Image: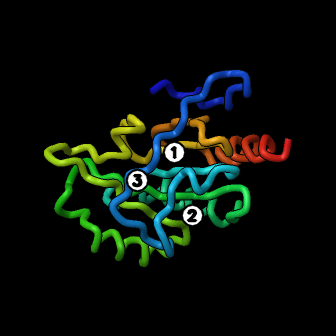
Amino acid sequence: MASCPDSSIMPMERYYPPAPELQVAEWLNAPADITLASLRGRVVLLHAFQMLCPACVSHGVPQAQRAWETFGQRDVVVLGLHTVFENHAAMHPGALRTFVLQSKLGFPVGIDSPRPAESIPATMHAYQLQGTPSNVLIDAHGRIRLHHLGYIDDLRLGMLIGRLVAEIDA
């Protein structure tokens, strides 16, 4: 999957691939299952992380929490995706529930569905994520507008989200 440049979101005339539907085994902090189809009309920040990833714990997850607190849920939805591709035994759903509770995360967190006999889970595979932390911005039409591995500055992420929200109102 081609990544959008980190410096900006491409103009609307460009082709943006449709975001694959999330393949989640279980949702935490959500009253019901969440689908991308149900979120059409809103910008989605999908934050992929692992609870034992140092960069995720120190930078990525707190940034996703700040985005959730800043943007609310009207035009922007923040979703966490716990996508385990290593240390599977240590990062089981019970440990994640404790992590989410202790971290006081307010946004929904999906547990990426495992694939039998594969170390890379289903959504991570579908999005061709190269590791964690990763951020994927999905526009109101369900298209991938940013695919970023590693930390992205808060101001830059906020600007990119703001541009996508402005497209909703345009």
Instruction: Describe the element under mark 3 as helix, strand or loop.
Output: strand
Residue occupied by mark 2 = 65
Q: Name which residue lies at 36% across and 36% down.
A: 130
Q: Give percent across and percent down for residue 138.
A: 60, 43
Residue 54 seen by the camera: no
Q: Name which residue lies at 31% across and 54% down.
A: 113
Residue occupied by mark 1 = 135
Mark found first going from the N terminus, 1 or 2: 2
Quarter of the N terminus within the rendering: top left
Residue 36 badge:
none
| Residue farthest top in this picture | 14
Q: Name which residue lies at 42% across and 59% down.
A: 57
Q: Give percent across and percent down for residue 132.
A: 39, 46
| Residue farthest right in this picture | 170
77 w.r.t. 138: above or below: below
Residue 154 seen by the camera: yes
Name the residue type under label 1: Asn
Residue occupied by mark 3 = 49
Mark found first going from the N terminus, 2 or 3: 3
Instruction: Describe the element under mark 1 as helix, strand or loop.
Output: strand
Q: Are marks 1 and 3 in contact (CB under 8 Å)?
A: no
Name the residue type under label 3: Phe
Quarter of the C terminus within the rendering: top right
Mark found first going from the N terminus, 1 or 3: 3
52 w.r.t. 168: above or below: below
Instruction: Describe the element under mark 2 as helix, strand or loop.
Output: helix
Mark pair 1, 3: CA separation: 9 Å
Mark pair 2, 3: CA separation: 13 Å
| Residue 127, quarter of picture | top left
Name the residue type under label 2: Gln
